[in-house]
Image (tube, helix red, strand yellow):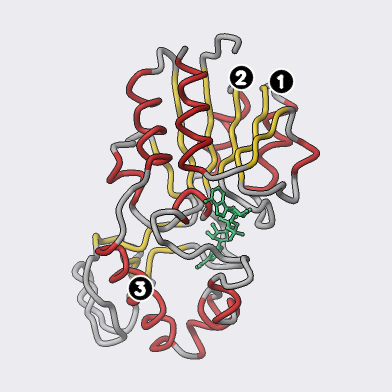
Amino acid sequence: MPRYSRIVILTGAGISAESGVDTFRAKDGIWSKVDYRDVATPQGFARDPDRVHAFYNSRRRGLASVEPNAAHAALARLERAFAGTVLLVTQNIDDLHERAGSSRLIHMHGELVRALCANCGQRHEWSDDMDTDHPCPTCHSAGFLRPDVVWFGEMPYQMERISAAIALCDLFVSIGTSGNVYPAAGFVEEAKMAGAHTVELNLEPSEGRSHFAEAHYGLATELVPAFVDRVLS
Ligand code: NAD
């Protein structure tokens, strides 16, 4: 494999699937059980905040029973051992990348373990259940706390930093994402325009398959450690 110096990696639900976290669009995925409009839109939260809190409380509690897998561990190893820069951009709201040891990490769709106050705009670490009675630890107003996750119709976080990194990268790798949700689904085209080599590692071809110069299909826990070995060799 040629020598790269600036890598951007995008991950999606597929990297956490073998840890036991449900993906979204699979036949038995999260969106087959709940309507995303009810639990993942600002309108759904305005209509029924208790329902939305219950959905994310259950997912937050679920973090206690899952562990990072070999794919998360391989990306943390890449960050430690690579001579150039690695930026990991995840669409996942779980905390498995940081628990595996990754630190140059952007949660572009937010984090389950954080709360955002819609009144004062402050963010707080949050490991317990959340409900409409909780006062914000900063402004002390109740009724404004929401999970710090990006819902459909909202702008993902740190887009400028992500675009700047993609514009300079020479290797872009997309792992475990179906390529349905923009802007993340468009990163591969930005990377191609920047002249980067583009690689897809996924269980099956994604929507964006034709944009990738190289693709490997199979389990993330097998593909990602092998790919990291190649990059580091
Ligand atoms: P997805 O469920 O659409 O796709 C998962 C992908 O992973 C699929 O392509 C599948 O083939 C692959 N996969 C499954 N198991 C795998 C394995 N073991 N190894 C390798 N690949 C595997 O998930 P996505 O692409 O992450 O979904 C897009 C985004 O929609 C989500 O990340 C999520 O952030 C987002 N979204 C969610 C919410 C929310 O819940 N609040 C809100 C807005 C957006």
Locate residue 71, reporting x and y percent: 43, 40
In the image, taking residue 146 as reference, residue 165 lies left or right, namely: right
Report the front residue among 200 and 161: 200
Q: Which amino acid lies under the numbered mark 3 shown in the image of this protein?
A: Asn
Report how many numbered discs are placed on residues in the image: 3
State which mark lies toward you, 3 or 2. 2
The crowding category of the residue bearing disc 1, from other C-alpha atoms within 10 Å (few below 14, some 14 to 19, many at least 20), is some
In the figure, residue 170 lies in which quadrant? top right
| Labelled disc at residue 98 | none
| Labelled disc at residue 119 | 3
Report which residue position mark 1 lands on. 195
Seen at 41% across and 33% down, the residue is 75
Please tell me whether mark 1 sits on a helix, a strand or a loop: loop
State which mark lies toward you, 3 or 1. 1
Please tell me whether mark 3 sits on a helix, a strand or a loop: loop
The crowding category of the residue bearing disc 2, from other C-alpha atoms within 10 Å (few below 14, some 14 to 19, many at least 20), is many
- First along the sequence among labels 3 and 1: 3
Q: Which amino acid lies under the numbered mark 2 shown in the image of this protein?
A: Asp
Report which residue position mark 2 lands on. 170
Q: Which amino acid lies under the numbered mark 1 shown in the image of this protein?
A: Gly
